[in-house]
Amino acid sequence: MNHGISILFRAIPIVMAVICFFLGGFIFLYGDDGARQVAGPVVFFLGAICLALYATAATIIRQLIHKFHTVLKYLIPGFGYLVAGITIAMGIWIFSTGGNSNFIVSGHVVAGIGLIAACVSTAATSSTKFYLIPVNSAAVGNTVNKNGFSAMTQNVLIGLVILFSLVAWIWCIILLSRAGEGAYYFVAGTVMGGLACICTSLIALVASIAKQIRNTYGENDRRNWPKLVLIMGSIAFLWGIIVILARVGHTANTTGFIMIGLGLVCYSISSKVILLAKVWKRSFALANRIPIIPIVTALLALFLGAFLFEEGLYDSAFFVPARVLVGLGAICFCLFSIVSILESGTSKK
């Protein structure tokens, strides 16, 4: 990877974050109707995930171009965790002080977005010794690399993402248990479930990176981690279809389109987990084709959003999912940047 390409791949998450920030701010400030109070904050804070993905991209790229200094080892992942912490805090503040059901929905969803940003930041932390992956991949056998993570560090990294995922799932269950109090709890709980699917998918990414750095990645890992991500994506996707069909005639049924978008994000994450599995200790001729996956999911999210924008001219219920899908498309495009970096760093060519 040359310096120019490294700048491009680091710029993509920043540009996508700026788009989310400006679009979310524009949506929120351009009017005072309830749909804008939901879509505005959610789209705005989807930019936080983009910034966390930037931290991951910068951590890996700086190792590939040999400009990863000791301070940056802590500073870059720390930036991601700071963004995640601010996002969670803002989400709690929004649903605690918003004063109406629209802010209850957006506040809980924003907090869930913060949990995803925390998982992505853990992926950045686990990538601080990424340079060892191609070294271990070229070595024969699975002797633990003494320069890699200790067993405790590996378990802590994986444990953190599991913790964030459990919080998201418990949060989802609590919100859905209160669905009888109002449809807004059903909407918030459903979306939180999709966000939990993304957090769970990121367990596979962090585990794959940490285990390959330590050189303890085995055949069970190669088979099971990609399956976990694909299962989570399928759960979110099917959940969305069920909501759309089961809630026909209700405004809440449009939440299903957001779930489909969250499923597409999981499928984008699968590209990285699949790549790491395919190139580990072997050659894979189609490795440079895997970055097509997040490109396809980004386009699907954007095209679906375009259709919903058109539908929104006749039914205002489609206002929120149409705009949220644009933000999810931006995240998928950020993930294209990350998987391209991984392909460059692990390529046998």
Image (cartoon, rainbow, N blue to C red):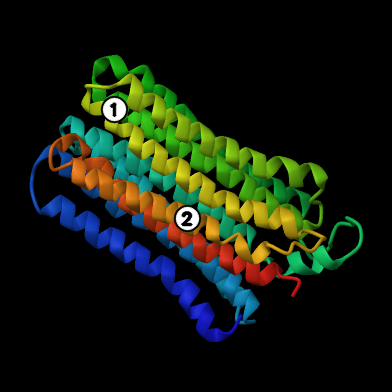
Q: Position of residue 131 (x, y in %)?
A: 71, 70
Q: Position of residue 115 (x, y in %)?
A: 45, 44
Q: Amino acid at mark 1?
A: Asn
SS class, disc 2: helix
Looking at the image, residue 168 sits to the left or right of residue 22; the answer is right
Say above or below: 106 vs 60: above
The image quadrant that residue 299 belongs to is: bottom left
Q: Residue at x 47, y 27 (%)?
A: 170
For the C terminus, which image quadrant? Answer: bottom right
Say above or below: 184 vs 140: above
Q: Residue at x 31, y 39 (%)?
A: 92
Looking at the image, residue 302 sits to the left or right of residue 126; the answer is left
Q: Earlier in the sequence, mark 2 or mark 1?
A: 1
How crowded pointer 2 is (Cα within 10 Å; few <14, some 14-19, many 20+) is rated as some
What separation in Å lies between label 2 and label 1 (alpha carbons)?
25 Å
On the image, numbered disc 1 is attached to which residue? 253
The foreground one among 300 and 26 is 300
How many marks overall?
2
* Closer to viewer: mark 2 or mark 1: 2
For the N terminus, which image quadrant? Answer: bottom right
On the image, numbered disc 2 is attached to which residue? 296
Say above or below: 68 vs 181: below
Q: Residue at x 62, y 81 (%)?
A: 65
Q: Residue at x 20, y 37 (%)?
A: 97
Q: Residue furthest top?
A: 180
Looking at the image, residue 267 sits to the left or right of residue 138; the answer is left
Looking at the image, residue 56 sits to the left or right of residue 159; the answer is left
The foreground one among 119 and 251 is 251
Give me the disc on residue 288: none
Q: Is residue 83 among what the camera can see?
A: no
Q: Amino acid at mark 2?
A: Val
SS class, disc 1: helix
